Image (cartoon, helix red, strand yellow):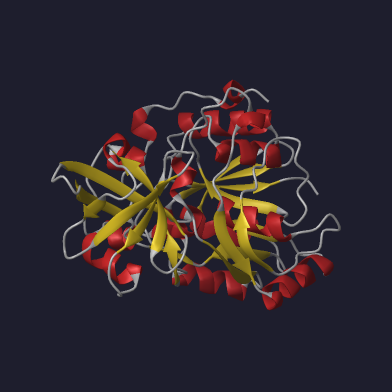
């Protein structure tokens, strides 16, 4: 499909720079499989789901993966370098997107301050680098010392990250270090809401997908068939897979909280509709025409025009339905993107 089909105009004032407070006070647009649109707030979610439904959360934790440093060469030359870690390669090495990459060549050392430095080992075909960090301390410890929270570019371009973001940009489910972007649909949940969902017999399961910085990259191809997704690491254990299969077997719905949860579930689900244990990379790219196998609904924020995520929700609900939903959201003053409001997408069975 042509990428232009997924374009729309979004006024800049629709972009949220801070989350709602409290988190479950954010607005929620329910989109039905019949194209119906209904305005709610997130704390009304228990009334919008059914007993025996199950929400699936991503328990990844955002690490302070953005670094600013100085490139130093054997000849004494210097240049300012920005690095956003994207994906772990091993205990010492990470793949990173580099700002001012033309000034960096393999073998250069980058000093990020706070006694944190790394060697640029290899430039990859997509222009990113593999950085090998010096020393013996875990890289996560080094990042806590020298890194900062990697806010999405559409927020970072309007204001600097601050102390509030260290808490605001983590979900209440965050446990496993490794993401460089938050699974933002889960930012709307509070303990009170989780307790209310449990009392309504709506289940909750967790999986892990470490969101990479590639989630923010624009689609530069003219046709979706030419776009290449960046791989992200994820895992679903056998117990969780069995419980999710049991939900569907008894007539409940598996509702992914966020596109990251959805993409991992679909990666782990066979053509027979059975969710299986999974551990490894996924680069699944979902566009209209895809047949969903493992999920029955999705709670997600509002996404960028021409993005792979807007393509995903269009695959789930239909392009015309999502174009109408987004036009409604813009006209009704919904807040967009990572710190914005949410939608609940419930396709027809």
- The answer to which quarter of the image holds residue 97 is top left
Q: Quadrant of the N terminus?
A: top right
Q: Nearer the viewer, residue 72 or 50?
A: 72
* Number of marks in the rendered image: 0
Residue 218, relative to residue 20: is it above or below? above
Nearer to the camera, 312 or 87: 87
Q: Position of residue 211 (x, y in %)?
A: 49, 55
Q: Residue furthest right?
A: 272
Nearest the viewer among 343 and 235 is 235
Among the 4 quarters of the image, the one containing residue 280:
bottom right
- Horizontal side, residue 45 vs residue 123: left or right: right
Above or below, 149 relative to 73: below
Along the viewing direction, whichever of 193 and 81 lies nearer the viewer: 81
Could you tell me which residue is drawn at 15 percent across and 42 percent down?
Answer: 77
Q: Can residue 19 be seen here?
A: no
Write the residue at 61% across / 23% down. Answer: 5
User: Residue 37: image x %, image y %?
Assistant: 62, 38
Q: Is residue 348 visible?
A: yes
In the rendered structure, the answer to whether residue 231 lies left or right of residue 155 reads right
Q: Quadrant of residue 240?
A: bottom right
Left or right, 116 with respect to 173, comes to left
What residue sits 61% from the left and 70% below the top?
204
- Residue in the image at 86% along x and 58% along y: 272
């Amino acid at each position: 499909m042509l990428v232009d089909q997924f374009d729309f105009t979004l006024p800049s004032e629709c972009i949220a720079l801070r989350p709602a407070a409290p988190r479950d006070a954010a607005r929620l647009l329910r989109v039905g499989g019949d194209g119906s649109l209904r305005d709610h707030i997130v704390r009304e979610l228990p009334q919008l789901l059914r007993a025996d439904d199950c929400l699936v959360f991503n328990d990844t934790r955002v690490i302070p993966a953005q670094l600013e440093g100085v490139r130093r060469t054997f000849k004494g030359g210097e240049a300012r370098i920005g690095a956003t870690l994207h994906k772990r390669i091993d205990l010492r090495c990470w793949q990173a997107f580099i700002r001012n990459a033309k000034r960096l060549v393999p073998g250069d050392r980058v000093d990020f301050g706070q006694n944190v430095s790394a060697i640029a080992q290899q430039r990859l075909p997509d222009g990113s680098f593999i950085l090998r960090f010096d020393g013996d301390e875990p890289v996560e410890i080094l990042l806590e010392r020298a890194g900062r929270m990697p806010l999405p570019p559409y927020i970072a371009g309007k204001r600097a990250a601050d102390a509030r973001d260290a808490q605001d940009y983590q979900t209440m489910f965050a446990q496993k270090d490794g993401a460089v972007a938050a699974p933002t649909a889960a930012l709307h949940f509070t303990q009170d809401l989780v307790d209310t969902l449990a009392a309504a017999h709506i289940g909750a399961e967790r999986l892990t997908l470490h969101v990479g910085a590639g989630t923010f990259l624009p689609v530069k191809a003219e046709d979706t068939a030419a776009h290449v997704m960046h791989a992200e690491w994820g895992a679903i254990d056998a117990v969780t897979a069995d419980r999710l299969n049991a939900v569907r077997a008894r007539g409940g719905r598996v509702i992914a909280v966020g596109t990251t949860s959805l993409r991992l579930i679909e990666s782990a689900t066979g053509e027979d509709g059975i969710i299986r244990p999974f551990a490894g990379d996924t680069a699944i790219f979902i566009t209209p025409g895809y047949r969903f196998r493992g999920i029955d609904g999705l709670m997600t924020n509002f996404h960028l025009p021409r993005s792979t995520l807007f393509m995903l929700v269009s695959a789930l609900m239909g392009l015309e339905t999502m174009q109408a939903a987004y036009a409604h959201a813009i006209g009704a003053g919904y807040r967009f993107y990572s710190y914005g409001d949410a939608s609940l997408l419930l396709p027809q069975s």
